[in-house]
Amino acid sequence: MGKGGGEYLMSTSDQQLGSVGIVEPKSVTLAHPPDPLRLVCGRTLGPITVAYETYGTLTPEKDNAIFILHALSGNAHVAGKYANEDRNIGWWDSMVGPGKAFDTDKYFMICANVIGSCSGTTGPSSINPETGRPYALSFPMITIEDMVQVHKRLMDHLGIERLLSVAGGSMGGMQALQFAVSYPDLVESAIPIATTARHSAQNIAFNEVGRQAIMADPNWRDGNYYDLEPPNRGLAIARMIGHITYLSDESMHQKFGRRLQERLQKGFKFDIDFQVESYLQYKGARFTERFDANSYLYISKALDYFDLTEGVSSLAERFRDLKARFLVISFSSDWLYPTYQAKEIVKALKANGLHVVFCEINSAYGHDAFLLETEQESRLIRDFLAHTYTAVRNRRMT
Amino acid sequence: MGKGGGEYLMSTSDQQLGSVGIVEPKSVTLAHPPDPLRLVCGRTLGPITVAYETYGTLTPEKDNAIFILHALSGNAHVAGKYANEDRNIGWWDSMVGPGKAFDTDKYFMICANVIGSCSGTTGPSSINPETGRPYALSFPMITIEDMVQVHKRLMDHLGIERLLSVAGGSMGGMQALQFAVSYPDLVESAIPIATTARHSAQNIAFNEVGRQAIMADPNWRDGNYYDLEPPNRGLAIARMIGHITYLSDESMHQKFGRRLQERLQKGFKFDIDFQVESYLQYKGARFTERFDANSYLYISKALDYFDLTEGVSSLAERFRDLKARFLVISFSSDWLYPTYQAKEIVKALKANGLHVVFCEINSAYGHDAFLLETEQESRLIRDFLAHTYTAVRNRRMT
């Protein structure tokens, strides 16, 4: 590489710029009896172990904490890596770090694996202390509201009384909305991204087919497979269905078109012919290495149960006691949670006179855009957080 | 019911108005060796039994024959019923009959079950005469082009040399396009509805997940299940996925919303909660009563293989030798074969100076609209056929 080439190259240290670097997975066990979690379904659960990570430094005023909320298959590992050689970089690393949208030089970031999941937080694959065996389907049904309840317990544990923001995409956005609804006095702002205030019939339909695929797998055995071969074929099919809904017609066309896999001609067999088939099968199979089929059932059901209009006459009524500022983001090609659903949220917030910034980002990436269109998201989020933080500090000074 | 009420009621005979009445399923065996069908995959197949129906009367000039082409799960039974008490009315009865869009007082209608299917035409569930056992996966891979080849053999058998029109929705529309391409001199007009000139990556993806669901069912047994329990759970899941793509977000919202099934409260179990879940499971289960899982594999693959641009530089080049007049219809909420795909067809036809009428019908019904929006479809088709027939007769007289 000759002279001057350096300006087009990044040194190793430059590449690290903006990374939170090596992070530490943390864990705490909460909700010990006699103070278990009271779930929406009517049952109680406890103790509950919560896997979480934090980045950045909490100010002495404890006014810079932001809770990041993850999607269906996510976990607490938002940014950085666990070791120098680790290739498992956090799922929103492009958004969280020094100088990034969620600037760890300014803010204290928290993310926790949701209840019902399988990445360290108590879920159906966890050992039930009363039986010494995995909960499996004896695990109680959980809701988005329950996930947020557990997050609140973690806040208590961390000694954090208020959040500068709650932010997340997809199911993370639902949790952000639910956070603002459940704890209106604890949340300065919320950033729901690529999300909805209630699962639509089409959303429910896709999830139900995924659940049917899992439960049709003979290895599922009514959920009792933990010491046996797991229902990986069913789970892979559920994930394949999910993946189609995360992409868009346009992004699939751009990414795969009708390109054939490996050979130049159609196989005229039921093997893989097209690259899109190969991609989906790969994604489905990889997913089974890191996700529990029962967790998929529980969390997809929590999504389907999510409806902020339940028990009230309108979404605006549900938002009546809210105080938070909002940044609502949708993506033009997201057909899982289309822009009209984001607009319903915006309209109901505005009906309550709340401060709302709304942006539909033009993107071909479909629902996955919330993980990919980080440049435009960053600009919006950086400004929104800065204004919110200024407002919070000004309020305290006056 | 008082006087005058009669004007709002239809008598039994009125209800029969426009019905072709009792129809007869027909069958013929063609392509006997040494003249078997030469398939696109390179293999030969014969003899081939073809189930078909005809309605109306062929003119002495044999100039009024219209071939109706069915969709993935369709059959030859387009209109009427087999007996007075029969509740199994043809799948496009609202469109085919005396005075209807496809007016059996004027036209001679033909419809044949496609090769590879399971409603009377030779497919994987048929007995292979060489082995005395069902073909199962030894059945050769078929394509839309092969389906049309068989239709041509049936035309020869019926002594019909030219078709006034070829018409169909979804896969039927693909066959209509393929008919015009394969036999440009035999087709006066074509009516492709809610269809595409090539399956998109998203189309392939949905079909592949359906196939995976079938092949993951342990009852599938590599296709050898004909004297055993069939893979109905897998087939039902494939059909459920299909159904979601046939509806639209809007039509599912209107039809089901988030309405709960039977009870007023969520079950907090993995049973059916929502009406949309119940509907899909019902549709999936019913489908297994009338459809063969291997046929689903073969026909869905034929759909995925469909690409009229294969081997040519553009769709316009593929249409270069065409002579037919075209009526192309799409539906605004059809996201399986969206309007932009119909416009690609229209553009390529017009590039060849062909006579094309195009209409996007405004509908919330999604892809299923081609079966439901019969009033608007009827108006378009009736006029188009009348003009085409006049042109054909005028041409003969000059």
Image: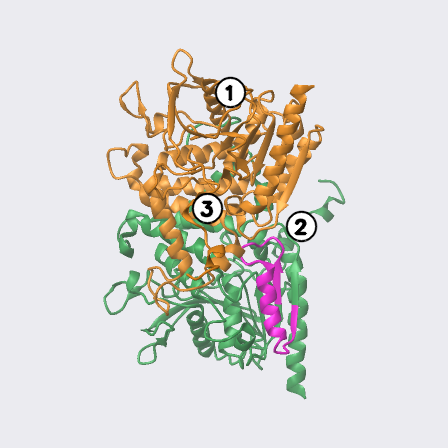
Chain colours: A orange, B green
The amino acid type of the residue labelled 2 equals Met
Whether residue A197 is visible here, answered yes or no, is: no
Q: Is A211 placed above or below B398 here?
A: above
Instruction: Name the residue type under label 1.
Output: Ile
Residue occupying the far front of the picture:
A3
- Nearer the camera: disc 3 or disc 2: 3
Labels 3 and 2 touching (C-beta < 8 A): no
Q: Position of residue B150 (x, y in %)?
A: 42, 72
Q: Which residue is mark 1?
A: A160
Which residue does the numbered mark 3 point to in the structure image?
A: A14
Marks 1 and 3, how far apart at CA = 33 Å
Image coords of residue B54 (percent x, y): 51, 68
**Tag 3 subunit:** A
Coordinates of residue B27 in the picture (x, y in percent): 41, 68
In this view, the residue farthest toward the top is: A34
- Magenta residues? B328-357
Quadrant for the C terminus of chain B in the image: bottom right
Q: Which sits earlier in the primary sequence, circle 1 or circle 3?
A: 3
Residue A251 percent location from the top left of the image: 51, 55
The residue pinned by badge 2 equals B10
Residues at discs 3 and 2 both on one chain: no
Judge by depth and name the residue closer to the eye, B232 or A350: A350
Residue density around tag 2, few if under 14, some if 14–19, many if 20 or more, within 10 Å: few
Q: CA distance from mark 3 to mark 2?
A: 80 Å
Query: Residue at (52%, 38%) from the top-left corner?
Result: A170
